[in-house]
C-alpha cells in the first residue's frame, strides 16, 4: 500500500527539494508500516462490528457517552472528544437516533446547546458488543506483541500522543 | 480521548462478559495511545496540508498515481490501493478533477473501466508539497523516536501489517 511520499519523489531537483530531510529507508519502512496498521486495523475492526450493525464511529460514541455522568454529553464536547466536525457528528447522531441508540435533547436550564444521551438500548448494545470487540482488538493487534514489545511501544507512543494532544489543544 | 471500550464496561455481569479477555491496564493504555496517535497524527498532517489546498486523501492519491507507469491507474485498482469504496473514491476524483490534479479517462482498447491519470499540474503539486509534508511527518512522528525505538517499533509493527494485509486480501 503506497500512501505518503516521504522519500524524494522522482525527478526532484529544485533547491528546496535538495534541502528536504527525506526519510531514510528504515524510517520510510516504519512510516508505511504505521500507516498500514492504522488504516487496515480500523478497516478490520469496522468489518467485525458490521454484524452488530455498528460503524466504528458509532461504537466510539457509545463508549464515550457510557463513561459520562448521566450518560450524556453536550454535542460540542462530544465533537471534541471524538475529533469530529460538528456537522459530521450531527449527521452521525441523527443516524444513531434513528437506530434508537441515542437521543438528542435540550437540557432544561442550559441554553448552550443540545445534549446527546445514551438510551437504554444504546447501553445494552454496548454491553452486548464489547466482548466481541475486545476479542477483535486482541486478535488483530494487542496479542501480536510480546509483553516487552508492548511496554516499549507504549513508552515510545505515549509522549507522541501527548505532543499531538497538546497541538490539538486538548492536553 | 476515550475511544474503544476494551476494559469491562460498568455493570457487566453476564456470563459472556465474565469470560471476556478484557485488556489489562497496560494493554488498555497502549491501545488508547495507539488510537490517539493514529487519529491525532492524521488530523495534524491534514491541517498542515490545508495551506496547499489538499486533503490528506488527495495527497495519497497523488502519491499512488505518481508511482505508476504512465502515472495512471485503473479506478478499481486505485480504490483497492487506497482502501476506499469505489463510490467514495469516485467523489474524491471528481473533486480532484475540478482542481486540475487528475483526469478521468477511458483507455482505448481497454473496456474494463476508467483510469485516473495524474496531470502535469498534479505532478507539480506533489513535487511542491512533498518537502513540507515530510517535514511534518518528521516533526510530529519520526523524529520523536530514538534509532533503537524506531527499529523496535518497525519490528513489532511489520508482522501486524502483514497479518492485516493478508486479511484484507492484499498480501
Image (cartoon, coloured by chain):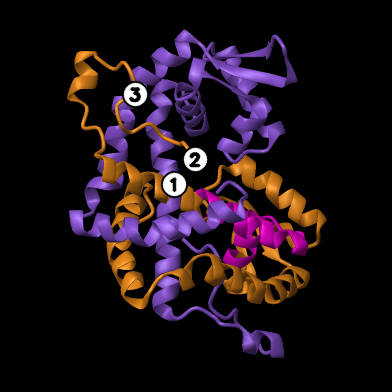
Chain colours: A purple, B orange
Q: Residue at x 39, y 38 (%)?
A: A45
Say which chain tag 2 marks: B
Observer-nearest of A170 and B129: A170
What range of the chain is rendered magenta? B39-64
Asked if both marks, 1 and 3, belong to the same chain, the answer given is yes
Observer-nearest of A111 and A122: A111
Question: In the rendered view, would you say B45 is above or below B70?
Answer: above
Q: Is residue B15 left or right of residue B88?
A: left
| Dot 1: element | helix
Residue B35's disc is: 1
Residue A53 in picture, x, y percent from top left: 46, 22
Q: For the residue carrying disc 2, how many other residues have a C-alpha within 10 Å: few (<14), some (14-19), or many (20+)?
A: some
Residue for badge 3: B9
| Dot 2: element | loop
Q: Is residue A107 left or right of residue B25?
A: right
Residue A117 in picture, x, y percent from top left: 56, 16
| Dot 3: element | loop
Residue A41 in picture, x, y percent from top left: 40, 46
Residue A111's disc is: none
Observer-nearest of B124 and A6: A6
Rounded to the nearest angstrom, the CA distance separating label 1 from label 3 is: 19 Å
Q: Is residue A69 visible?
A: yes
Tell me the quarter of the picture where residue B107 sits: bottom right
Rounded to the nearest angstrom, the CA distance separating label 1 from label 2 is: 9 Å
Amino acid at each position: 500500500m503506497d500512501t505518503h511520499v516521504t522519500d524524494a519523489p522522482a525527478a526532484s531537483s529544485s533547491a528546496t527539494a535538495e534541502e528536504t530531510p527525506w526519510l531514510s529507508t528504515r524510517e520510510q519502512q516504519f512510516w508505511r508500516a504505521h500507516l498500514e496498521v492504522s488504516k487496515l486495523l480500523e478497516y478490520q475492526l469496522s468489518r467485525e462490528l458490521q454484524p452488530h450493525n455498528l460503524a466504528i464511529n458509532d461504537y466510539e460514541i457509545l463508549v464515550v457517552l457510557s463513561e459520562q455522568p448521566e450518560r450524556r454529553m453536550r454535542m460540542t464536547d462530544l465533537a471534541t472528544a471524538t475529533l469530529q466536525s460538528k456537522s459530521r457528528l450531527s449527521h452521525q447522531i441523527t443516524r444513531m437516533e434513528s437506530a434508537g441508540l441515542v437521543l438528542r435533547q435540550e437540557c432544561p436550564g442550559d441554553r448552550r446547546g443540545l445534549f446527546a444521551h445514551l438510551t437504554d438500548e444504546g447501553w445494552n448494545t454496548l454491553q452486548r458488543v464489547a466482548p466481541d470487540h475486545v476479542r477483535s482488538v486482541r486478535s488483530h493487534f494487542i496479542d501480536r506483541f510480546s509483553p516487552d514489545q508492548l511496554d516499549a511501544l507504549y513508552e515510545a507512543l505515549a509522549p507522541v500522543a501527548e505532543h499531538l494532544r497538546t497541538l490539538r489543544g486538548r492536553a
